[in-house]
Image: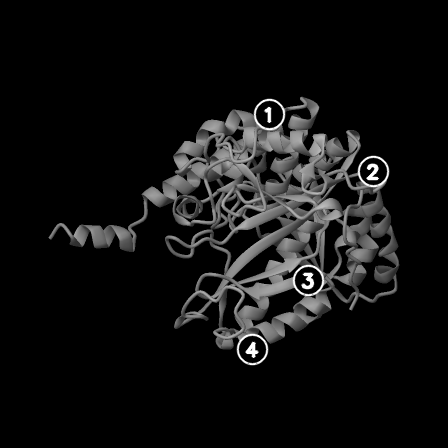
Amino acid sequence: MVRAPRPAGPRTLAEREAAARGMRAALDRGDVPRVLLLVPDPHARFAAVELSGRFVTEEVLTGGYGICTYVFAWDVEREALPLGADSPLARYVDGYGDLRMRPDLATITALPDGVCGIVCDVEWPDGEPARAAPRRVLAEQLTALESLGYVPSAGLEHEVVFRDADGPLSAHGVDYAVGGTERMRPLLRDLRVALERSGLGVESARAECHPGQYEIVLRHRDALAACDDALLQQLIVRSVAAEHGVSAAYLAAPEPGQGCSCHVHLSLSSLAGEPASGHGTALSPVMASFLAGVLRDAAALAPVWAPTWNSYVRLRTAPFSPRELRWGVDDRTASVRVAGRDSSLRLEFRFAGADAQPHLVVAALLAAGRAGVEEALPLPPAGEVLGALPGAPWEALSGLDRVAKLLGDEVAAQQEALLRAELAAGCSAVTDWQRRRGALRA
């Protein structure tokens, strides 16, 4: 099965483009019978169209392929968001025309059932980029950071909870355990094979601290690949789990007091690939200012880290999902942990839940960090509390002006519409919690 290599460490956008050109021959030879074109949407999932490999080679690589505009302006149930005519996002639901997918051949991945997945960029018919597309948002931030002479590499950690009809596949927390995971083992065995065939490059896998929770971590790589591959991994995990009659849930808070996160490990290098994060455990001046910028804007960017009602259950109740904005060296109680040393020195950002859109999460980190570098912001002392993330979704709406400044008007409008839709849905639902509270009044 054809699959694109995933080199570890930093890679410039130009190097990615060269890798993509190198994969064209595999398609031309007819080695890829079926292709799934994949577009990351705002809900940390793919919109997809399946095509024949020959058609992709003969038509799509040159002319692109259509996908409806509303994939960047729909709610989690795939209903168009209610948008005013003056919204920067309005044209995505005005007429429901087509955008054009452009396959990125550096992403070719072997998926289950003999299909190759290819992640796509998206543009308007006239060639204008679709700036509400999460992948485009990240690419723009990578371009801006490269203009300063820096290239990030990233590693994303997502926890998943496996459940069947009887509940989580472990009855209790099994953090780092070997025993206690017996019900998971048939699923994990098949998942191991599928991920190996995919070529995504798994670094580690282990049981986690809540019932049914597991974590599979990919190696550090260029930031665009890290986000694409995180979603590709989730696609494979869900597919294999379904074959076992198991659900794979990336819910931010499976239960009160429990959290599933999207921790982002991020380091900086020069354009030539030389480490630029620091020495020992001491951050370089550029990395210190980068961290200062993120800490300054973290609260305003809450709609990106915490896009759902459930996100705020995680932030309010999960002990290792700290709302306090502070940093520390190898301190998992801090919202930002300085991890590793020397060539492996990196920042671990612990803001986002597993329900967050990874391309937007990393784009937000890069935008805020770059602002800190451009302003040469001083880094506050380790341990100093600099504020807190919002504790409720309606509180997160207050930072949208800063989201627009950092990520653009379309992204800000998208995040506002999504969060307001989440609030409306939550306030229109009758839950078990409400029923229990109502019974107490009897």
Q: Which residue is mark 2?
A: 271
Q: Is residue 153 left or right of residue 191?
A: right
Q: In the drawing, does residue 168 fall left or right of residue 220? A: left
Towards the viewer: 337 or 58: 337
Disc 2 element: loop
- According to the image, label 3 marks what residue? 202
Residue 332 vs residue 266: left or right? left
Whole-number angstrom distance, CA of label 4 to CA of label 1:
48 Å
Numbered badge on residue 344: none
What residue sits 54% from the left and 40% below the top? 73
C-alpha distance separating marks 1 and 3: 36 Å
Q: Are marks 2 and 3 in contact (CB under 8 Å)?
A: no
10 Å crowding of disc 3: few (<14), some (14-19), many (20+): some
- Which sits earlier in the primary sequence, circle 2 or circle 3? 3
Q: Position of residue 216 (x, y in %)?
A: 61, 61
Which element type, helix, strand or loop, lies under badge 3? Answer: strand
> Residue 332, how many percent across, how many down?
53, 48
Q: Is residue 85 visible?
A: no
Query: Residue flagged by tag 3: what amino acid is it?
Result: Val
Please tell me which of labels 2 and 4 falls first in the chain.
4
- What colour scheme was applied to this rendering of the protein? one colour
Q: Residue 397 in the image: state x and y as whole percent.
A: 45, 31
Residue 186 is tagged as 4
Q: Mark 1 packing: few (<14 Cα in 10 Å), some, or many (20+)?
A: few
Q: Residue 187: percent from the left, percent from the top?
A: 56, 74
Q: Earlier in the sequence, mark 4 or mark 1?
A: 4
